Image: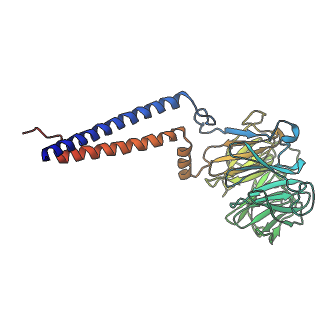
Amino acid sequence: MAAEMSSEGTQISRARVVLAVAIILLLALLVALVVVFMNLIKPAGLPQGEQAADKLRWERSMYGFGPSPDEQLLLPSSVAIAPNGDVYATDPMRARVMVFRPDGTFRRLLHTGAGGTGKGQFIRPEAIDIDREGDVYIADSWANKIIVFDAAGRYVREWPVDVQARGVGVTDDRVYVLDVGKVLVFDKQGNRLSAFGERGPAPGQIDAYQGITGRDGFIYVAEPFNKRISVFTEKGDIEWVVPSGRAKRSGPSREATGTDSSASDAVPGHRWDLPQDLVFDAAGRLIVVDAFRFEIAVVDPKTGKAQAVFGEFGRNEGQFYYPTSIDYDPARDWFAVADTNNNRIQIVRIPGSANPGAAALWRASSSPYRYLAVPFMLMLLAIALGLWSVRGGLRRGIFTEGVA
């Protein structure tokens, strides 16, 4: 009886080993087939080939929600990205905001009470920004107020400002409002905390209308008419101004790139022509869009010096025609750009913008080879099962029976 049980146990153990080996071979074959398949075709939506180390990479463009002119963006002036990846684009001439999903498909229109001056109504949504909770802050430059909606598009609150609200930037606990020569600082409930500035070309004066953001207690302003970037404390003290010389007033053009005082002195030959908007990326760099240079510039936030530039003039995808606004999505490591005179929002990537640790994780989750994770884990499980079976067999003397 004992001999029969021992023989049965031996057969079961051998069957387990054979089964484990078969599973390993099948999974190895599956992995090989998947690798071959991934090399033969590229999944939809994935970039064809690797991004060059010094190139801008276009992902997609968003033009509207239908084929008719009324369903298309018309000179979008501002763009913002929500925590869930939704892209908001102002359509100021039609008093509305378009909302797109991260994949570029249209989600909805935000135009509750558009065209009026009452509560929840707006006339010209000039600029837009979104906080970490997903609340949407709109600067209405004609109604002189800030209007707040939640992530579902419901009206939350609003407050008046005593300037023409052309720019808005939101941090964890601050709302910065920009007019051509003045900065206003509010808390998120609309309580005014401070104000400073006067219009002019001298360092410390301001001549701007949209680009404003805050970080670590400093306020960063893109001054298109002064052709420079300025950084202030909340009391209005200057941290730095680049370029530091007195601005020369001249009509902007592709050729008219300013005077010697407007050079950044970091990227050879780089000058500001019309820096419109700015945002921080996950690597802590200041990213500035220059409308009249049709480019995105990477700036050292401590010195104001340009480190790299990306982009070129054109109407093709990945090119710009008077871009006026930019925002960054740290989860997807890409930028949304309001490509104003091309009547579209473009999603682009530039090198070095991600947090190194987060970038590795995102690349892994975005890579087409992520589909190999499950069979790879199963293969590891099968190997462990096989080793366990072999170990059990050795303990029982299965592989040494018959040896004197």
Residue, far top: 40
Residue, far left: 404
Query: How many numbered discs sit on the rendered protein?
Result: 0
Residue 264 appears in the rendering: yes
* Residue drawn at 75 percent across, 57 percent down: 152
Q: What scheme was used to colour the molecule?
A: rainbow
Quarter of the rendering containing residue 175: bottom right
Please tell me which residue lies in front, 2 or 28: 2
Please tell me which residue lies in front, 62 or 54: 62
Horizontal placement of 68 versus 330: left or right?
A: right
* Residue drawn at 77 percent across, 39 percent down: 320
Residue 359 in the image: x percent, y percent?
56, 48
Quarter of the rendering containing residue 172: bottom right
- Quarter of the image with the C terminus is top left
Horizontal placement of 332 versus 126: left or right?
A: left
Looking at the picture, does residue 27 appear above or below residue 187? above
Please tell me which residue lies in front, 304 or 137: 137
* Residue drawn at 22 percent across, 40 percent down: 11
Residue 330 in the image: x percent, y percent?
63, 52
Quarter of the rendering containing residue 173: bottom right
Residue 361 in the image: x percent, y percent?
53, 49
Residue 244 appears in the rendering: no
Residue 396 in the image: x percent, y percent?
18, 47
